[in-house]
Amino acid sequence: MPSLNPTHDPARRSWVASANHSEADFPIQNLPFGRFRRRDGEVRTGVAIGDRIVDLAAALAAGLLDGAARAPAEAAVGDLRGLLELGNAGASALRARLSALLLAGGPDQAAAGAAADRILVAQAEVEMILPTTVRQFSDMCVSTFHIGRLSGNDDRGQPICPPVFRTLPVGYDGRATSVVVSGTPVRRPNGLWTEQVGGTGDPRFGPEPRQDYELEMGAWLGGPDNPLGEPTRIAAAADRLFGLCLLNDWSARGIQFWENMLGPFLGKSLATTVSPWIVTMEALAPFRAAAFQRPAGDPPVPAHLLSDADQRDGGLDIALEARLRPHGAAGKQDAVICRTNFRHMYWTFAQMVTHHSSNGCSLGPGDLIGSGTCSGPALAEAACLLEANVEGPLSLPNGDTRLWLADGDTVILRGRASRDGYVPIGFGEATGRLMPAPDPAA
Ligand code: MN
Protein backbone atom coordinates (compact mmCIF):
# COMPACT_ATOMS: atom_id res chain seq x y z
CA MET A 1 0.00 0.00 0.00
CA PRO A 2 1.63 3.29 -1.02
CA SER A 3 2.13 5.54 1.99
CA LEU A 4 1.61 9.26 2.15
CA ASN A 5 4.58 11.45 1.26
CA PRO A 6 5.31 15.05 0.24
CA THR A 7 3.72 14.51 -3.21
CA HIS A 8 0.32 14.37 -1.46
CA ASP A 9 0.90 17.59 0.50
CA PRO A 10 -2.28 19.68 0.00
CA ALA A 11 -0.19 22.84 0.26
CA ARG A 12 1.59 21.99 -3.00
CA ARG A 13 0.58 24.17 -5.94
CA SER A 14 1.95 24.08 -9.46
CA TRP A 15 3.38 26.86 -11.59
CA VAL A 16 1.09 25.38 -14.29
CA ALA A 17 -1.83 27.60 -13.27
CA SER A 18 -4.65 25.39 -14.65
CA ALA A 19 -3.62 22.64 -12.20
CA ASN A 20 -4.62 24.79 -9.24
CA HIS A 21 -8.32 25.27 -10.04
CA SER A 22 -10.52 23.69 -7.39
CA GLU A 23 -12.35 21.65 -10.07
CA ALA A 24 -9.17 20.44 -11.79
CA ASP A 25 -8.95 16.68 -12.34
CA PHE A 26 -5.17 16.86 -12.59
CA PRO A 27 -3.66 18.94 -9.78
CA ILE A 28 -0.02 18.41 -8.85
CA GLN A 29 -1.16 15.75 -6.34
CA ASN A 30 -2.47 13.52 -9.17
CA LEU A 31 0.16 13.22 -11.97
CA PRO A 32 -1.45 10.35 -13.96
CA PHE A 33 0.34 8.64 -16.85
CA GLY A 34 -1.00 8.51 -20.41
CA ARG A 35 -0.06 8.15 -24.07
CA PHE A 36 -0.92 10.56 -26.85
CA ARG A 37 -0.41 11.36 -30.50
CA ARG A 38 0.91 14.81 -31.32
CA ARG A 39 -0.28 16.85 -34.30
CA ASP A 40 2.82 15.74 -36.22
CA GLY A 41 1.69 12.14 -35.72
CA GLU A 42 4.37 11.21 -33.22
CA VAL A 43 3.31 9.01 -30.29
CA ARG A 44 4.50 10.21 -26.89
CA THR A 45 3.92 9.36 -23.25
CA GLY A 46 3.31 11.95 -20.62
CA VAL A 47 1.90 13.04 -17.30
CA ALA A 48 -1.20 15.23 -16.99
CA ILE A 49 -0.91 18.51 -15.08
CA GLY A 50 -3.92 20.82 -15.25
CA ASP A 51 -4.86 21.17 -18.93
CA ARG A 52 -1.29 20.36 -20.06
CA ILE A 53 0.82 17.22 -20.43
CA VAL A 54 4.48 16.87 -19.48
CA ASP A 55 6.03 15.13 -22.52
CA LEU A 56 8.39 12.63 -20.86
CA ALA A 57 10.74 12.32 -23.85
CA ALA A 58 11.05 16.12 -24.03
CA ALA A 59 11.66 16.40 -20.29
CA LEU A 60 14.37 13.76 -20.54
CA ALA A 61 15.97 15.57 -23.47
CA ALA A 62 15.91 18.79 -21.45
CA GLY A 63 17.89 17.05 -18.72
CA LEU A 64 15.10 17.48 -16.17
CA LEU A 65 14.60 13.81 -15.25
CA ASP A 66 17.87 12.68 -13.74
CA GLY A 67 18.74 10.68 -10.66
CA ALA A 68 16.25 8.02 -9.57
CA ALA A 69 13.69 9.36 -12.08
CA ARG A 70 15.84 8.71 -15.13
CA ALA A 71 15.42 4.93 -15.50
CA PRO A 72 11.62 4.94 -15.05
CA ALA A 73 11.28 7.94 -17.40
CA GLU A 74 13.32 6.16 -20.06
CA ALA A 75 11.25 3.01 -19.54
CA ALA A 76 8.06 5.04 -20.01
CA VAL A 77 9.01 6.72 -23.29
CA GLY A 78 7.09 5.58 -26.36
CA ASP A 79 4.78 3.10 -24.60
CA LEU A 80 3.92 2.94 -20.92
CA ARG A 81 4.43 -0.83 -20.88
CA GLY A 82 8.06 -0.37 -19.83
CA LEU A 83 7.00 1.69 -16.82
CA LEU A 84 4.29 -0.81 -15.92
CA GLU A 85 6.93 -3.55 -16.01
CA LEU A 86 9.13 -1.59 -13.61
CA GLY A 87 6.20 -1.40 -11.22
CA ASN A 88 5.26 0.95 -8.44
CA ALA A 89 8.71 1.77 -7.08
CA GLY A 90 9.81 3.14 -10.46
CA ALA A 91 6.62 5.07 -10.96
CA SER A 92 6.98 6.51 -7.46
CA ALA A 93 10.51 7.79 -8.14
CA LEU A 94 9.30 9.43 -11.36
CA ARG A 95 6.29 10.93 -9.59
CA ALA A 96 8.47 12.44 -6.86
CA ARG A 97 10.71 14.09 -9.45
CA LEU A 98 7.79 15.42 -11.53
CA SER A 99 6.12 16.80 -8.41
CA ALA A 100 9.33 18.70 -7.59
CA LEU A 101 9.67 19.99 -11.16
CA LEU A 102 6.09 21.25 -11.33
CA LEU A 103 6.03 22.72 -7.81
CA ALA A 104 5.38 26.44 -7.61
CA GLY A 105 8.14 28.11 -5.65
CA GLY A 106 10.30 24.98 -5.64
CA PRO A 107 14.01 24.89 -6.40
CA ASP A 108 13.35 23.39 -9.85
CA GLN A 109 10.76 25.90 -11.02
CA ALA A 110 13.25 28.11 -12.82
CA ALA A 111 14.81 25.28 -14.82
CA ALA A 112 11.51 23.60 -15.61
CA GLY A 113 9.77 26.88 -16.38
CA ALA A 114 12.54 27.84 -18.80
CA ALA A 115 11.89 24.59 -20.69
CA ALA A 116 8.08 24.85 -20.49
CA ASP A 117 7.67 25.48 -24.23
CA ARG A 118 9.49 22.23 -24.96
CA ILE A 119 8.16 19.93 -22.25
CA LEU A 120 4.49 20.99 -21.94
CA VAL A 121 1.81 20.13 -24.50
CA ALA A 122 -1.79 21.35 -24.37
CA GLN A 123 -4.20 18.44 -23.91
CA ALA A 124 -6.54 20.15 -26.40
CA GLU A 125 -3.89 19.79 -29.11
CA VAL A 126 -3.27 16.05 -28.87
CA GLU A 127 -5.23 12.86 -29.35
CA MET A 128 -5.13 10.52 -26.38
CA ILE A 129 -4.61 6.84 -27.22
CA LEU A 130 -4.64 3.70 -25.07
CA PRO A 131 -1.87 4.04 -22.43
CA THR A 132 -0.45 0.74 -23.62
CA THR A 133 -1.57 -2.22 -25.68
CA VAL A 134 -3.96 -4.21 -23.52
CA ARG A 135 -2.41 -7.63 -22.96
CA GLN A 136 -5.46 -9.29 -21.42
CA PHE A 137 -8.78 -7.98 -20.20
CA SER A 138 -10.87 -9.64 -17.50
CA ASP A 139 -14.06 -8.24 -16.05
CA MET A 140 -15.30 -8.93 -12.57
CA CYS A 141 -18.77 -8.50 -11.05
CA VAL A 142 -18.44 -7.54 -7.40
CA SER A 143 -21.34 -5.29 -6.41
CA THR A 144 -24.05 -7.24 -4.62
CA PHE A 145 -26.32 -4.25 -5.26
CA HIS A 146 -25.86 -4.69 -9.03
CA ILE A 147 -26.72 -8.39 -8.86
CA GLY A 148 -29.56 -7.92 -6.40
CA ARG A 149 -31.35 -5.01 -8.12
CA LEU A 150 -33.55 -7.31 -10.19
CA SER A 151 -33.93 -10.06 -7.57
CA GLY A 152 -34.77 -7.95 -4.52
CA ASN A 153 -33.65 -8.18 -0.91
CA ASP A 154 -33.66 -11.06 1.54
CA ASP A 155 -35.18 -10.98 5.03
CA ARG A 156 -32.04 -9.21 6.30
CA GLY A 157 -32.64 -6.42 3.77
CA GLN A 158 -29.60 -7.54 1.78
CA PRO A 159 -29.49 -8.02 -2.00
CA ILE A 160 -30.37 -11.54 -3.13
CA CYS A 161 -27.41 -12.97 -5.07
CA PRO A 162 -26.43 -16.51 -6.01
CA PRO A 163 -24.26 -17.75 -3.11
CA VAL A 164 -21.05 -17.62 -5.16
CA PHE A 165 -21.05 -13.78 -5.18
CA ARG A 166 -20.27 -13.63 -1.46
CA THR A 167 -17.62 -16.38 -1.57
CA LEU A 168 -15.36 -15.04 -4.34
CA PRO A 169 -15.09 -12.08 -6.76
CA VAL A 170 -16.96 -13.43 -9.80
CA GLY A 171 -15.43 -12.65 -13.18
CA TYR A 172 -14.88 -13.73 -16.77
CA ASP A 173 -12.13 -13.32 -19.33
CA GLY A 174 -13.01 -10.59 -21.81
CA ARG A 175 -11.42 -9.43 -25.03
CA ALA A 176 -8.35 -7.19 -25.09
CA THR A 177 -8.89 -6.44 -28.80
CA SER A 178 -12.11 -4.55 -28.21
CA VAL A 179 -10.83 -2.24 -25.46
CA VAL A 180 -10.87 1.31 -26.87
CA VAL A 181 -9.88 4.69 -25.53
CA SER A 182 -12.36 7.39 -24.56
CA GLY A 183 -13.82 9.17 -27.58
CA THR A 184 -13.84 6.13 -29.85
CA PRO A 185 -17.32 5.60 -31.41
CA VAL A 186 -18.97 2.31 -30.44
CA ARG A 187 -21.11 0.38 -32.90
CA ARG A 188 -24.36 -1.25 -31.83
CA PRO A 189 -23.84 -4.96 -32.40
CA ASN A 190 -25.94 -7.41 -34.35
CA GLY A 191 -26.62 -10.67 -32.62
CA LEU A 192 -29.13 -13.31 -31.65
CA TRP A 193 -31.72 -12.15 -29.11
CA THR A 194 -35.33 -12.60 -28.10
CA GLU A 195 -38.12 -10.06 -27.58
CA GLN A 196 -38.50 -11.04 -23.92
CA VAL A 197 -35.98 -9.57 -21.47
CA GLY A 198 -34.23 -12.48 -19.82
CA GLY A 199 -33.70 -14.57 -22.93
CA THR A 200 -36.96 -16.53 -23.31
CA GLY A 201 -38.86 -16.97 -26.57
CA ASP A 202 -37.65 -17.50 -30.13
CA PRO A 203 -34.40 -15.75 -31.03
CA ARG A 204 -33.66 -13.79 -34.20
CA PHE A 205 -30.54 -12.12 -35.53
CA GLY A 206 -30.45 -8.34 -35.82
CA PRO A 207 -29.44 -5.05 -34.19
CA GLU A 208 -29.30 -5.36 -30.39
CA PRO A 209 -32.54 -3.85 -29.02
CA ARG A 210 -31.35 -3.45 -25.41
CA GLN A 211 -27.96 -1.78 -25.64
CA ASP A 212 -26.66 -0.77 -22.21
CA TYR A 213 -23.59 0.68 -20.55
CA GLU A 214 -21.92 -0.33 -17.26
CA LEU A 215 -20.05 2.17 -15.08
CA GLU A 216 -16.94 0.42 -13.77
CA MET A 217 -13.37 1.10 -12.77
CA GLY A 218 -10.43 -0.64 -14.40
CA ALA A 219 -7.13 -1.61 -12.76
CA TRP A 220 -3.92 -1.66 -14.81
CA LEU A 221 -1.46 -4.19 -13.42
CA GLY A 222 2.26 -3.55 -13.10
CA GLY A 223 5.41 -5.23 -11.89
CA PRO A 224 6.59 -8.67 -12.96
CA ASP A 225 4.24 -11.51 -13.95
CA ASN A 226 3.39 -14.15 -11.42
CA PRO A 227 4.70 -17.26 -13.20
CA LEU A 228 2.07 -19.75 -14.34
CA GLY A 229 1.24 -21.98 -11.39
CA GLU A 230 2.32 -19.46 -8.75
CA PRO A 231 -0.55 -17.51 -7.20
CA THR A 232 -0.19 -13.97 -5.86
CA ARG A 233 -0.95 -14.08 -2.15
CA ILE A 234 -3.29 -11.44 -0.74
CA ALA A 235 -0.44 -9.76 1.17
CA ALA A 236 1.38 -9.14 -2.13
CA ALA A 237 -1.63 -8.31 -4.28
CA ALA A 238 -1.92 -4.56 -3.59
CA ASP A 239 1.55 -3.93 -4.99
CA ARG A 240 0.54 -5.56 -8.28
CA LEU A 241 -1.99 -2.76 -8.88
CA PHE A 242 -0.32 0.05 -10.83
CA GLY A 243 -3.26 2.42 -11.23
CA LEU A 244 -6.91 2.86 -12.07
CA CYS A 245 -9.05 4.22 -14.88
CA LEU A 246 -12.75 4.58 -15.64
CA LEU A 247 -14.24 1.76 -17.67
CA ASN A 248 -17.50 1.40 -19.61
CA ASP A 249 -18.36 -2.26 -20.15
CA TRP A 250 -20.81 -1.76 -23.03
CA SER A 251 -23.37 -4.53 -22.60
CA ALA A 252 -25.81 -5.86 -25.18
CA ARG A 253 -28.50 -7.28 -22.89
CA GLY A 254 -30.51 -9.14 -25.54
CA ILE A 255 -27.43 -10.98 -26.80
CA GLN A 256 -26.07 -11.43 -23.27
CA PHE A 257 -29.18 -13.07 -21.86
CA TRP A 258 -29.73 -15.41 -24.83
CA GLU A 259 -26.10 -16.61 -25.08
CA ASN A 260 -25.45 -16.82 -21.33
CA MET A 261 -24.65 -20.55 -21.04
CA LEU A 262 -20.88 -20.38 -20.42
CA GLY A 263 -21.00 -16.74 -19.27
CA PRO A 264 -20.67 -13.42 -21.11
CA PHE A 265 -19.36 -13.56 -24.68
CA LEU A 266 -20.65 -11.45 -27.60
CA GLY A 267 -22.93 -9.44 -25.33
CA LYS A 268 -19.80 -7.88 -23.81
CA SER A 269 -17.00 -8.08 -26.39
CA LEU A 270 -18.50 -5.45 -28.73
CA ALA A 271 -16.45 -2.73 -27.02
CA THR A 272 -15.02 -1.62 -23.67
CA THR A 273 -14.18 2.07 -23.27
CA VAL A 274 -11.45 3.22 -20.87
CA SER A 275 -10.39 6.71 -19.79
CA PRO A 276 -6.92 7.50 -21.17
CA TRP A 277 -5.10 8.38 -17.92
CA ILE A 278 -3.76 5.84 -15.42
CA VAL A 279 -4.21 7.36 -11.98
CA THR A 280 -1.57 5.64 -9.88
CA MET A 281 -2.31 3.81 -6.65
CA GLU A 282 0.16 6.20 -5.03
CA ALA A 283 -1.94 9.20 -6.09
CA LEU A 284 -5.00 7.40 -4.67
CA ALA A 285 -3.36 6.69 -1.29
CA PRO A 286 -5.21 9.51 0.57
CA PHE A 287 -8.54 8.10 -0.58
CA ARG A 288 -8.15 4.56 0.71
CA ALA A 289 -11.06 3.22 2.74
CA ALA A 290 -11.91 0.10 4.67
CA ALA A 291 -12.98 -2.90 2.62
CA PHE A 292 -16.76 -3.42 2.34
CA GLN A 293 -18.25 -4.23 5.73
CA ARG A 294 -20.01 -7.56 5.42
CA PRO A 295 -23.50 -7.54 6.93
CA ALA A 296 -24.29 -10.02 9.70
CA GLY A 297 -25.15 -13.39 8.20
CA ASP A 298 -22.78 -13.12 5.21
CA PRO A 299 -20.11 -15.81 4.95
CA PRO A 300 -16.67 -14.79 6.28
CA VAL A 301 -13.93 -13.64 3.90
CA PRO A 302 -12.12 -16.80 2.76
CA ALA A 303 -8.73 -17.06 4.44
CA HIS A 304 -6.78 -16.81 1.17
CA LEU A 305 -8.51 -13.49 0.38
CA LEU A 306 -8.14 -12.07 3.88
CA SER A 307 -5.44 -9.72 5.13
CA ASP A 308 -5.64 -7.13 7.88
CA ALA A 309 -4.10 -4.44 5.70
CA ASP A 310 -6.51 -5.09 2.84
CA GLN A 311 -9.50 -5.11 5.19
CA ARG A 312 -8.30 -1.88 6.79
CA ASP A 313 -7.68 0.17 3.64
CA GLY A 314 -8.04 -1.98 0.53
CA GLY A 315 -11.20 -0.09 -0.44
CA LEU A 316 -11.37 3.23 -2.24
CA ASP A 317 -13.63 6.23 -1.76
CA ILE A 318 -14.15 7.41 -5.34
CA ALA A 319 -17.31 9.27 -6.38
CA LEU A 320 -18.45 8.05 -9.80
CA GLU A 321 -20.93 9.51 -12.23
CA ALA A 322 -22.50 8.52 -15.55
CA ARG A 323 -24.09 11.04 -17.89
CA LEU A 324 -26.15 10.46 -21.00
CA ARG A 325 -26.03 13.01 -23.82
CA PRO A 326 -29.04 12.11 -25.95
CA HIS A 327 -28.64 12.11 -29.74
CA GLY A 328 -29.68 15.36 -31.32
CA ALA A 329 -29.92 17.15 -27.97
CA ALA A 330 -29.80 20.89 -28.47
CA GLY A 331 -26.82 22.36 -26.71
CA LYS A 332 -25.50 20.56 -23.68
CA GLN A 333 -28.45 18.65 -22.23
CA ASP A 334 -26.64 15.89 -20.40
CA ALA A 335 -28.66 13.81 -17.99
CA VAL A 336 -26.94 12.45 -14.90
CA ILE A 337 -28.13 8.83 -14.98
CA CYS A 338 -26.04 7.50 -12.09
CA ARG A 339 -24.15 8.83 -9.07
CA THR A 340 -22.38 6.13 -7.07
CA ASN A 341 -19.16 5.35 -5.23
CA PHE A 342 -16.50 2.68 -5.57
CA ARG A 343 -16.72 1.87 -1.85
CA HIS A 344 -19.94 -0.11 -2.54
CA MET A 345 -17.85 -2.91 -4.06
CA TYR A 346 -18.04 -6.14 -2.06
CA TRP A 347 -14.44 -7.17 -2.89
CA THR A 348 -11.26 -5.10 -3.17
CA PHE A 349 -9.06 -4.93 -6.26
CA ALA A 350 -6.34 -6.78 -4.29
CA GLN A 351 -8.80 -9.62 -3.62
CA MET A 352 -9.65 -9.67 -7.35
CA VAL A 353 -5.95 -10.07 -8.22
CA THR A 354 -5.46 -12.84 -5.67
CA HIS A 355 -8.61 -14.64 -6.73
CA HIS A 356 -7.71 -14.30 -10.43
CA SER A 357 -4.28 -15.89 -9.85
CA SER A 358 -5.38 -18.33 -7.12
CA ASN A 359 -5.49 -21.22 -9.61
CA GLY A 360 -2.01 -20.29 -10.84
CA CYS A 361 -3.20 -18.10 -13.74
CA SER A 362 -0.45 -15.69 -14.76
CA LEU A 363 -1.13 -11.94 -14.65
CA GLY A 364 1.21 -9.12 -15.49
CA PRO A 365 1.89 -5.65 -16.85
CA GLY A 366 -0.60 -4.56 -19.48
CA ASP A 367 -3.35 -6.69 -17.97
CA LEU A 368 -6.56 -4.77 -17.37
CA ILE A 369 -9.11 -5.90 -14.77
CA GLY A 370 -12.58 -4.36 -14.75
CA SER A 371 -14.26 -4.09 -11.37
CA GLY A 372 -17.80 -4.83 -12.49
CA THR A 373 -20.72 -2.44 -12.37
CA CYS A 374 -20.26 -0.05 -9.44
CA SER A 375 -23.85 0.04 -8.24
CA GLY A 376 -24.80 1.16 -4.75
CA PRO A 377 -27.96 0.38 -2.77
CA ALA A 378 -30.09 3.34 -3.93
CA LEU A 379 -31.79 3.38 -7.33
CA ALA A 380 -29.91 6.61 -8.17
CA GLU A 381 -26.73 4.56 -7.67
CA ALA A 382 -27.73 1.99 -10.30
CA ALA A 383 -24.72 1.98 -12.63
CA CYS A 384 -26.36 0.55 -15.77
CA LEU A 385 -29.75 0.92 -17.47
CA LEU A 386 -30.75 -2.69 -16.76
CA GLU A 387 -31.02 -1.63 -13.12
CA ALA A 388 -31.95 2.04 -13.53
CA ASN A 389 -35.03 1.26 -15.64
CA VAL A 390 -36.62 -1.22 -13.22
CA GLU A 391 -39.32 1.33 -12.36
CA GLY A 392 -39.76 2.46 -15.96
CA PRO A 393 -38.00 4.56 -18.60
CA LEU A 394 -35.62 7.33 -17.57
CA SER A 395 -36.82 10.87 -18.28
CA LEU A 396 -34.18 13.10 -19.86
CA PRO A 397 -33.95 16.91 -19.62
CA ASN A 398 -34.69 17.32 -23.34
CA GLY A 399 -38.02 15.53 -22.95
CA ASP A 400 -36.84 12.18 -24.31
CA THR A 401 -37.19 8.95 -22.38
CA ARG A 402 -34.88 5.93 -22.43
CA LEU A 403 -35.27 2.31 -21.46
CA TRP A 404 -32.06 1.52 -23.38
CA LEU A 405 -29.51 3.52 -25.36
CA ALA A 406 -30.54 5.00 -28.69
CA ASP A 407 -28.26 5.37 -31.72
CA GLY A 408 -26.33 8.63 -31.43
CA ASP A 409 -26.47 8.70 -27.62
CA THR A 410 -23.20 9.45 -25.82
CA VAL A 411 -22.33 7.97 -22.41
CA ILE A 412 -19.83 9.94 -20.33
CA LEU A 413 -18.22 8.47 -17.19
CA ARG A 414 -16.42 10.62 -14.65
CA GLY A 415 -14.77 9.91 -11.29
CA ARG A 416 -13.37 12.02 -8.49
CA ALA A 417 -11.70 11.17 -5.20
CA SER A 418 -11.86 13.65 -2.34
CA ARG A 419 -11.25 13.64 1.39
CA ASP A 420 -10.98 16.37 4.00
CA GLY A 421 -7.42 17.61 4.27
CA TYR A 422 -6.41 16.53 0.75
CA VAL A 423 -6.62 17.99 -2.73
CA PRO A 424 -9.28 16.14 -4.77
CA ILE A 425 -8.13 14.31 -7.86
CA GLY A 426 -10.09 13.20 -10.93
CA PHE A 427 -9.89 10.62 -13.68
CA GLY A 428 -10.84 12.64 -16.77
CA GLU A 429 -13.54 11.00 -18.85
CA ALA A 430 -14.47 7.71 -20.46
CA THR A 431 -16.78 8.76 -23.27
CA GLY A 432 -18.33 6.84 -26.12
CA ARG A 433 -21.05 7.52 -28.70
CA LEU A 434 -23.27 4.69 -29.85
CA MET A 435 -23.41 4.36 -33.65
CA PRO A 436 -26.01 2.41 -35.66
CA ALA A 437 -25.54 -1.32 -36.20
CA PRO A 438 -24.22 -2.61 -39.52
CA ASP A 439 -26.83 -4.01 -41.92
CA PRO A 440 -27.51 -7.47 -40.43
CA ALA A 441 -28.19 -8.88 -43.90
CA ALA A 442 -25.01 -7.56 -45.51
MN1 MN B 1 -19.35 -5.54 -16.48
Image: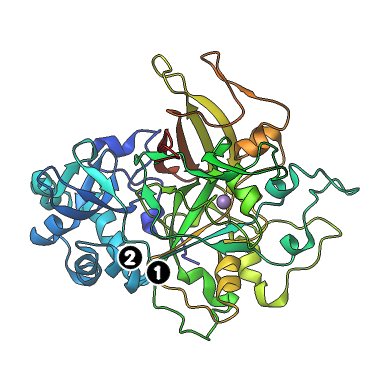
Quadrant of the image occupied by residue 5: bottom left
Image: 409 above or below 155: above
Q: Residue 223 at what x, y percent from top left?
A: 39, 74
Q: Is residue 287 visible?
A: yes
Marks 1 and 2 sit apart, C-alpha to C-alpha, by 10 Å
Image: 163 above or below 105: below
Direction from residue 171 to residue 186 in the image, left or right? left
Q: Residue 256 at what x, y percent from top left?
A: 60, 49
Q: What is the three-letter code of the residue carrying label 1?
A: Gly
| Closer to us: 210 or 247 | 210
Q: Residue 125 carries which label?
A: none
| Closer to us: 255 or 171 | 255
- Residue identifier under label 1: 222
Q: Can residue 253 be seen in this view?
A: no
Q: What is the three-letter code of the residue carrying label 2?
A: Ala
Image: 317 above or below 369: above
Quadrant of the image occupied by residue 96: bottom left
Q: Cβ–Cβ below 8 Å for labels 1 and 2?
A: yes
Q: How crowded is mark 2: few (under 14 residues within 10 Å), some or many (20 or more)?
A: many
- Residue identifier under label 2: 91
Quadrant of the image containing the C terminus: top left
Residue beneath the point at 18% across and 37% down = 125
